[in-house]
Image (cartoon, rainbow, N blue to C red):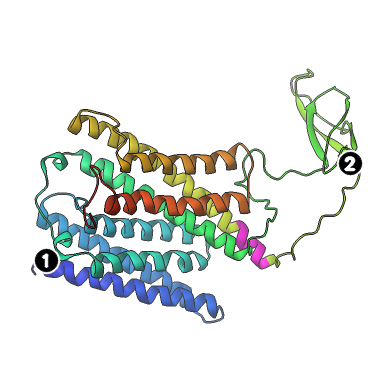
Amino acid sequence: MDLVVLQNWLDNASFAVLFVTMLIYWGGAAFPGIPYLPALGTSGMAIANMCIACLLGARWLEAGYFPLSNLYESLFFLTWGITVIHLIAENMSRSRLVGVATAPVAMGITAFATMTLPAQMQSAEPLVPALKSNWLMMHVSVMMLSYAALMVGSLLAIAFLVVTRGQNIELRGSSIGTGGFRSANYQLRRSGVNTFHETSLHSSAPVSISPVDGGIDLNGSAKTAVLNKVETKPAQKVDRAEPLEPQRLSLAETLDNISYRVLGLGFPLLTIGIIAGAVWANEAWGSYWSWDPKETWALITWLVFAAYLHARITRGWQGRRPAILAATGFAVVWVCYLGVNLLGKGLHSYGWFF
């Protein structure tokens, strides 16, 4: 079979499969009592993943180089990465809501690549001298996988905001960092030290600390940290939104946890991709960093998700605030990946609009 004909068949087939898969996930969310829909959705994503993998493989055989040299190829590689991360996240969360968020994005990307891009941008062309390097596979593939992971993680954060209706809820999961949820009745102190101090907990009321009986000092010294019970005066009641149902709250905790883990995967990939790009830029253009629009937005993307992980790990943010930050990162990733390439001038511009 002609490889060009095979590619045309596979890109249309991947769009059709993803469109049907999106409808299956949305139908499953609207009518959760219908059996087999979750399995059909997962199967659809797996089939689309294999179609895109075969498309990229045929492209590789036809052109003779790794298929990441133009926008058409990178869009399909991005979709392939999104489907891979989706399957991993769905397997971890056991929630069909993952597909509700990711399937329309994957379908939209394939529709844009197949139906919107000019025919010239879809055809394989010989590589320019700057792209004839092993760094093409190393840098671009890692960057695209990082975009896929960051997009999926951000979509799950957006799904979290939808599930919680934007409420600022308290989560008690295992991924809330060092400053996350702790019981308000206990506080760390050094063993053997009896102290009384004043602190502020919703007010300036004094708080007394009394040692917990039965504490064990492993080193026999006063340097061992033990938990002490804290007696506090009741704080004034604060008006809160209507509490979530247990099932919805459990789903919110799952989405928050999986989003954090997927973004934690995408950030180091983005870091490695930026470093590889800097090395390749020095080899090709004689400079590690030239403040090209693509480089600038890659740095902005890195800073946004670095702030997200810093807030989660060291500041103990959880719930709504980091989800809003991740949702902002979703828009930033798209500007970095597509916006500056199509609208801006620079070494990475595809030159479609200008």
The disc at residue 248 is none
Residue 152 position within the rendered picture, expressed as x and y whole percent measured from the top left: 44, 56
Q: Quadrant of residue 331?
A: bottom left
State the extent of the magenta-drawn residues as a range: 247-253
213 left or right of 292 in image: right
Task: Find out whether residue 252 is within the magenta segment.
Answer: yes
Nearer the observer, 320 or 172: 320
Q: Which residue corresponds to mark 1?
A: 4
Q: Quadrant of the C terminus?
A: bottom left
SS type, badge 2: loop
SS type, badge 1: helix
Seen in the picture, residue 164 relative to 331 is either above or below; the reply is below
Residue 299 position within the rendered picture, expressed as x and y whole percent measured from the top left: 39, 39
Seen in the picture, residue 291 relative to 147 is either above or below; the reply is above
Q: Quadrant of the N terminus?
A: bottom left
Residue at image x 41%, y 56%? Answer: 85
Residue 239 position within the rendered picture, expressed as x and y whole percent measured from the top left: 80, 59
The disc at residue 232 is 2
Magenta: main secondary structure equals helix
Residue at image x 38%, y 47%? Answer: 146
Q: Quadrant of residue 220?
A: top right
Q: Amino acid at mark 1?
A: Val
Seen in the picture, residue 95 relative to 69 is either above or below; the reply is below
161 left or right of 301 in image: right
231 left or right of 119 in image: right
